[in-house]
Image (tube, rainbow, N blue to C red):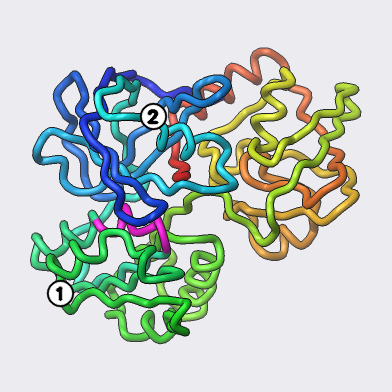
Amino acid sequence: MAKPTEPISACLRATRDLTPDVRLFEIEPDSPLVNVGPGSHIDVLVPTDGRPQLRSYSLAGSCADGLYRIAVKRLASSRGGSIGMWRLKAGERLTIFKPKNSFELSYDRPDYLLLAGGIGITPIYTMALALKQAGANFRLLYAARSRRDLAFADELATSIGERLQLFVSEEGQRIDIGGEIAQLDARGELYVCGPFGMLEAAKQLWSQSGRPAAHLRYETFGNAGRLAGAPFKIRVPRLGLEIDVPVNRSMLEALEDAGVDMIFGCRRGECGLCVLPILAASAEVDHRDVFFGIEERAMNSRICTCVSRAASGFLTIDTPDRTPNQRLSQRLSVQAGGLHKIRE
């Protein structure tokens, strides 16, 4: 399994509510800050009612004043991360890990389109500030359910002015992603961070436009799916196990809790390392990953255990029969690849 490296002791200096359910955390590490670029994130050991859980959050802003800033959305369906973070008070000690970047911004393009949905604004906000400072040509399209959900909107309006366009779904506003892509310079890049539906639409429309796949860069967050989260059971005939999966735990976590030796990387449905075969399902499977394509998800033969779930009932799966040497090799491979972030 993947392990974070270089733990760092830190102090939570202050918190501030950006919206009714998005809170900004200012964290001061005991060791000097590492230079980070837009799209970087830190991993945090979040205290929960059970064991501490590793969660990852995008850095907001340049960190020029010696503080790491992260924005955490409080979710009713949280697996413990957001609730644990929101319970923290200024002055408390934290364990964080050295910043990483799996969503890097390039600076050599003639045009940029930034697309954000909800809490996905966090890395996009930082990119917009960096592109403004670099004198780049860009636009930022930011969608949210209501105006009160528009975190960083005031700061962005002040910083980038007319480059920012807001879209509020409660007011009937929608982003014409295809039309916006058509306006982008042929050599331009699209950066997307938002909910599953937004990302899937952007990927499909980008492909249809015939533009280079490498010029579309995206990041997922959370594990929201088409169906509301519900408890269900996992059956593993090979191991003679029947495991309960609570609404606030992932399949991967439930399998780990039961002592099943799992391989994983991103924990957000991107890398595919935690994928297991589906043998049977008593209810609909809610595929919440971005690893599989539409056709693969429709086949319903495999599942990303870190984010996807059954709607109810039970899910019968198989687990790989790994030898100790295979497990070690896979773990080292995953460690080399690093971790990704879950924002909740």
Residue drawn 58% across the image and 21% down it? 50
Query: Which disc number belongs to residue 120?
Result: none
The answer to whether residue 324 is left or right of residue 24 is: right
Amino acid residing under circle 2: Val
Magenta residues, start to end: 118-125
Q: Is residue 190 above or below residue 262?
A: below
Tag 2's secondary structure?
Answer: strand
Query: Which disc number belongs to residue 161?
Result: 1
Residue occupied by mark 2: 44
Residue drawn 33% across the image and 25% down it? 96
**Marks 1 and 2, Cα distance to the nearest angstrom?**
33 Å
Amino acid residing under circle 1: Gly
Q: Is residue 215 visible?
A: no
Tag 1's secondary structure?
Answer: helix
The answer to whether residue 288 is left or right of residue 156 is: right
Q: Splitting the image into 4 quarters, where does residue 257 fall?
A: top right
Q: Splitting the image into 4 quarters, where does residue 64 fall?
A: top left
Residue 90 covered by magenta stretch: no
Residue closest to the eye, 165 or 155: 155
The answer to whether residue 218 is left or right of residue 162 is: right
Q: Is residue 303 above or below residue 130?
A: above
The answer to whether residue 126 is left or right of residue 288 is: left
**Residue 332 x, y percent position in the rendering:** 51, 22
Residue closest to the eye, 202 or 206: 202
Q: Splitting the image into 4 quarters, where does residue 68 fall?
A: top left
The quadrant of the picture occupied by the N terminus is top right
Q: Are marks 1 and 2 in contact (CB under 8 Å)?
A: no
